[in-house]
């Protein structure tokens, strides 16, 4: 009888462990996620020839299914002050190295980077952290569009006005693919929800301007632009149902 009791206790304990929820019970149902994102990024490939450190800020909108699949879109603005290969603006300087405003006074030119990224994404949350069921491994990929250009600021200068900007901003864009691996956490309080991970984007771009002042011609080359980013997001979950039914894995 004693051994039977021990066996019964062991069996009951084993069943309770086997049926422990591996993910946060509050979010086992389907829901919408709105993510506010920031991603510091380092360019590689052809993109590294133009820019240094790049910032990205944007919004992700996802739908998470009951089986933890993710579908959605993300949109980001890219910007930075670390630019390279802008010496071609020297064509506007006089013999003494100055550029003048319309009123004849010397001006100081600042150069920066501006860009955007838009993607459709698909991913999966994998609940592999048994001791921390509120956390999951995030794996996702995306396809979309990447664009970037130089932005020059020169007050009161006609040659750097919007009328002539197309001749030297080297606007480039094209198809982009991305891959991301990270960690996502959704707390029981619903207030501290975040994810962070590594995102790599490869874009196949071309210069979209018809004429370039520096080369005095049209740039018809194809480029492979790479952006390696640390993506950080604050999650705002929006439930599709008021039911909080835990899911157990048998």
Image (spheres, rainbow, N blue to C red):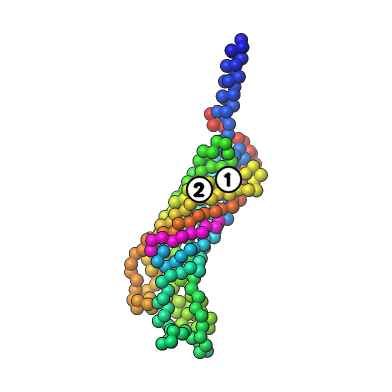
Q: Residue at x 58, y 49 (%)?
A: 194
Against 167, is 200 above or below? above
Helix, strand or loop at mark 1? strand
Q: Is residue 23 magenta?
A: no
- Residue assigned mark 1: 185
Residue nearest the viewer, comparing 189 with 26: 189
Against 117, is 12 above or below? above
- Residue assigned mark 2: 182
Q: Residue at x 54, y 60 (%)?
A: 57
Q: Is residue 41 magenta?
A: yes
Quarter of the rendering occupied by the N terminus: top right
Q: Is residue 7 visible?
A: yes
Kindly give the residue lying farthest to the bottom in the view shown: 104
**Are the residues tagged 1 and 2 within 8 Å (C-beta)?**
no
Against 9, is 217 above or below? below
**Inter-mark Cα distance, 1 to 2:** 10 Å
Which numbered tag is attached to residue 156? none
- Write down the quadrant of residue 247 in the picture: top right
Kindly give the residue lying farthest to the front in the view shown: 96
12 with respect to 124 (left or right): right
Q: Residues within 10 Å of mark 1 (few under 14, many from 20)?
A: many
Count all numbered tags in the image, as a single digit. Answer: 2
Provide the major secondary structure of the magenta segment: strand
- Write down the quadrant of residue 147 in the picture: bottom left
**Residue 186 pos. (x, y %):** 60, 45
Q: Is residue 144 visible?
A: no
**Residue 91 pos. (x, y %):** 40, 81
Look at the image and give the residue range highlighted in magenta: 37-46
Kindly give the residue lying farthest to the top in the view shown: 1
């Amino acid at each position: 009888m004693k051994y039977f009791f021990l066996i019964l206790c062991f069996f009951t304990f084993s069943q309770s462990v086997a049926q422990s929820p591996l993910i946060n019970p509050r979010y086992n149902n389907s829901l919408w996620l709105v993510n506010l994102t920031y991603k510091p990024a380092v360019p590689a490939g052809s993109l590294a020839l133009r820019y240094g450190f790049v910032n990205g800020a944007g919004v992700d909108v996802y739908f998470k299914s009951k089986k933890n699949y993710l579908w959605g879109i993300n949109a980001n603005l890219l910007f930075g002050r670390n630019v390279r290969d802008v010496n071609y603006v020297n064509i506007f300087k006089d013999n003494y190295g100055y550029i003048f405003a319309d009123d004849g006074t010397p001006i100081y030119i600042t150069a920066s980077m501006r860009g955007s990224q838009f993607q459709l994404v698909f991913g999966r949350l994998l609940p592999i952290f048994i001791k921390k069921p509120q956390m999951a491994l995030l794996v996702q990929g995306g396809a979309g569009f990447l664009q970037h250009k130089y932005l020059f600021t020169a007050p009161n200068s006609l040659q750097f006005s919007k009328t002539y900007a197309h001749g030297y901003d080297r606007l480039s864009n094209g198809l982009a693919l991305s891959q991301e691996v990270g960690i996502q956490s959704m707390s029981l309080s619903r207030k501290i929800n975040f994810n962070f991970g590594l995102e790599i984007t490869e874009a196949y771009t071309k210069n979209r301007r018809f004429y370039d002042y520096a080369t005095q011609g049209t740039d018809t080359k194809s480029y492979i632009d790479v952006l390696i980013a640390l993506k950080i997001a604050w999650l705002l979950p929006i439930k599709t149902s008021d039911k909080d039914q835990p899911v157990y894995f048998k």
